[in-house]
Image (tube, rainbow, N blue to C red):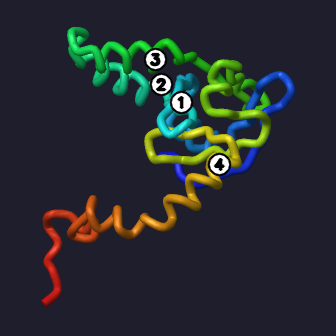
Amino acid sequence: MFYGEYEHAIDRKGRLIIPSRMREVMKEHYVERFFVTRGLDRCLFLFAEDEWRAQEKRFRALSITRREARHFNRFYFSGAVEVTCDKQGRVLIPNYLKDHAGIKRDVMLVGVSSRIEIWDRQEWQKFTTQFRESYEEIAERLLPDGGAGAGAKEEA
């Protein structure tokens, strides 16, 4: 649903403009409300409401008797906030979330299919530089058939 990389900046009031292409996708899918929370790898996760509810259901199924599950859920959900776009397509990002991701002003919005990740621009550049070296090796380990799926036939 969400794809691409977009450079933006957070204004003095902590508002971030969602790129017009992403807003078009939201409109096409009747998305009005979003949830933003602490992500992994020092970024923020922004989910459309239906995807957020699916995530919530999945994590709610984790046993509260497991310490790791309690800690993860506590940190993940306590950071969550519901947001909506204003008329200019902006969302308000709370300071504690910006602090988590090290965001000052310049950001990258990254479409990752079911979510949008919000990165400090320099952190995103570091990540892509480091990851670029291992991209193909990781693809070979995760997708041993080249991502063709179970129905694909190997060439002789």
Instruction: Report the amino acid beneath label 2.
Output: Glu
66 on left or right of 22? left
Residue at 23 percent of width and 18 percent of height: 61
Give the Cα separation between the discs numbered 2 and 3. Answer: 19 Å
- In the rendered image, the quadrant that contains the C terminus is bottom left
Specify the farthest residue to the right.
12
Specify the farthest residue to the bottom.
156
Give the Cα separation between the discs numbered 4 and 1. Answer: 13 Å
Per the image, the residue denoted by label 1 is 31
Indicate the position of residue 27 as horizontal and vertical percent values: 58, 37
Dot 4 or dot 1, earlier in sequence = 4
Q: For mark 3, give the secondary structure.
A: helix
Give the Cα separation between the discs numbered 4 and 3. Answer: 31 Å
Q: Which mark, residue 49?
A: 2
Q: For mark 2, give the secondary structure.
A: helix
Instruction: Report the amino acid beneath label 4.
Output: Arg
Q: For mark 4, give the secondary structure.
A: helix
Per the image, the residue denoted by label 4 is 21
Give the Cα separation between the discs numbered 1 and 2. Answer: 7 Å
Give the Cα separation between the discs numbered 4 and 2. Answer: 18 Å
Q: For mark 1, give the secondary structure.
A: loop
Per the image, the residue denoted by label 3 is 75
Confirm or deny contact between disc 1 and disc 2 (CB under 8 A): yes
10 Å neighbourhood of mark 4: few (<14), some, or many (≥20)? Answer: few
> Where is residue 96, by image quadrant?
top right
